[in-house]
Amino acid sequence: MISLLSHSLYTMKKTVTYLFASLLLVCHYNTRAQYNNLIGKKYPQRVINLYKIYGNVISAKDTIAANIIVSNLRTLAIKNNDKELEIEADFIKALDYEHKHYNQFQKGIKELQKVAVKAQSNNYEVILPKIYRVIGEAYWEGMNNYELAFENYYKMLKVQNQFTDLQCPDKALNFVTIGNAFYFFNDCKSCINNMRKALDVSTTDFSVKQKNTANNTIGLIYQQMGKLDSADFYFQRIINLKENYRLKEWIAISKGNLGYNKYLRGKYTEALPLMKEDVDQAILSSDYGLATTSLVHLAETYLKLGKNSEAEETASKAIEYARKSKEYRRWENLYPLLAKINIQNQNKELAKFYLDSAITVKDSLRKKFSALQLLRVNQKLDRETQIKLNNEKQRKTAQRNYLIVLILILVVLSLYVYFNQKKNSKQKQLIHDLKLKQMNGELCNATLQLKQFTEQINNKRKLVKDLESKLNKQDNNELLNQLQESTILTDEEWEQFRKLFEKVHSGFLIRLKEKLPNLSPAEIRFMTLAKLKFDNKEMASTLGVSPESIRVTRYRLRKKINLPEDGDLEELVNMV
């Protein structure tokens, strides 16, 4: 029985072989016509032709031939302003880095990542699942970095979820690819899950080719598990599929697997014709690895039927094709067969040699598989560590950026507050200056009015003085009446005078009342005129009283405020 690892390697190789064989189908029209058929089409409409071009580039004889294909495609795309086709040309160029012309996987990965960015910026995201799949294959096949391969496969599945089966024809191929990856590491459950998803994809001319692989792989897993009826079901589905391309190869493979199921059930006679058809088709297709395995099964069946000569002849052919295949794992099942044949022929020494060789190969493959599993575990741990380091770095970078942003915000706020306060200060100063200017203007105006008022009083005082001199010369009642009518500072005039005085000597009357609350109205007027530095005569003329009355008022005021004899009343006035 073929080991699961051997089956996985076999299946992966067959998948690649049949996929690229399909891409290299000879076209019935020339290259230019093929390119022109791509113009103005959506991705699903040109996917088959695109994959043919992929195959042409990969199978080109040299880099010059490959570059000509890519250059022609890009020129055609640019000429017709087909941005999506131009991106496809970039993809093909990046794809070629991974194959025989360059074999530069790291370079290919970087170029593919650039194409992904370009596709996203041009809203051509349907190509992304294909890009992530190819990147995953580069990590898998070229760099043996299985964790990064799986990481890109998971990205592939995530991105393709946003598209329908018809929008993204690659879905079946994508599911098969990751399914084979799980199969390689003996994760049968995950493999079957993805292969069934491939089978659930809508059937198209492109997806149908992947369903053969999916059915075959699921059948092989059930075969390994001993669930032969389930295995028969999936192998039979391949035979029943109506596929026009390479149907003979898949039918032969499926019949060979069905034949092996019959062998496992002990139905050796029924198994023979199915196995022979598988062998003949494998040899015809020059698939030496498959031919080796199929010949081993056929030889074992001959042994069960007692046809030793046929078994020996078939085993010899198996040795021939095993050497041609150059696949070490093919000897895992071939050596036990050779040991059985030599036991039948009573050649114990040779039988023992083959048994030892079988154990060596099996142990070697087991160790290799264990090493691969350990490598993947270490890669997973390294990847997790790297992700943690990246996350920590991102966290610190985010904290640093947050701190920088916070500082910038604080600086901006500080500048805002500073300039706002400066602006408010300027506004306040401006308002203060305007108020001060206004107050100064009002003060100047009041001073002028008070001066005019005072001059008016002085003029009246002169008039009174003239009248008085005339009264001394003649007793004239008419002039006396004029003198009385010229009395200065009536109540109305006093109020006007007081307002002007308050504007010039702001707060004087209030402070006077606070210091000397018991002053009479006449004494207040006296103190006001004293503030203006009026002498007794001027006060008498202004108030319309005799100079003697002024002296009496001054005397009473000194008494009321207890001002000593040597005290100066004007000093008191100035202190208010």
Image (spheres, helix red, strand yellow):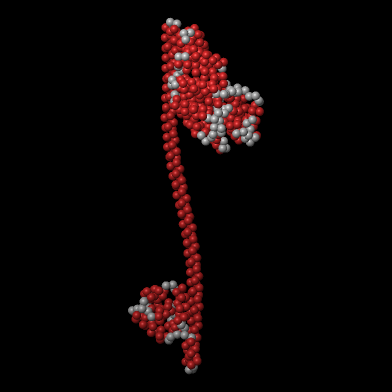
Residue 93 located left or right of residue 147: right
Q: Quadrant of the C terminus?
A: bottom left
The residue most toward the top is 346
Q: How many marks?
A: 0
The residue most toward the bottom is 475
What residue appears at the point 40 percent right and 86 percent down from the top-left corner? 548
Residue 225: x %, y % from top left: 43, 21
In this picture, is 308 found above or below 68?
Answer: above
In this picture, is 374 found above or below 481?
Answer: above
Residue 32 located left or right of residue 190: right
- Residue 91 is at least partly visible in this image: yes
Residue 87 located left or right of residue 318: right
Residue 376: x %, y % from top left: 44, 26
Q: Nearer the viewer, residue 289 or 474?
A: 289
Residue 307: x %, y % from top left: 48, 8
What residue appears at the point 47 percent right and 50 percent down from the top-left corner? 412
Q: Nearer the viewer, residue 338 or 73?
A: 338
What residue appears at the point 56 percent right and 32 percent down from the top-left corner? 166
Q: Nearer the viewer, residue 6 or 204?
A: 204
Residue 247 figure quarter: top right
Residue 382: x %, y % from top left: 43, 30
Residue 31 figure quarter: top right
Q: Quadrant of the N terminus?
A: top left
In this picture, is 305 found above or below 23?
Answer: above
- Residue 295 is at least partly visible in this image: no
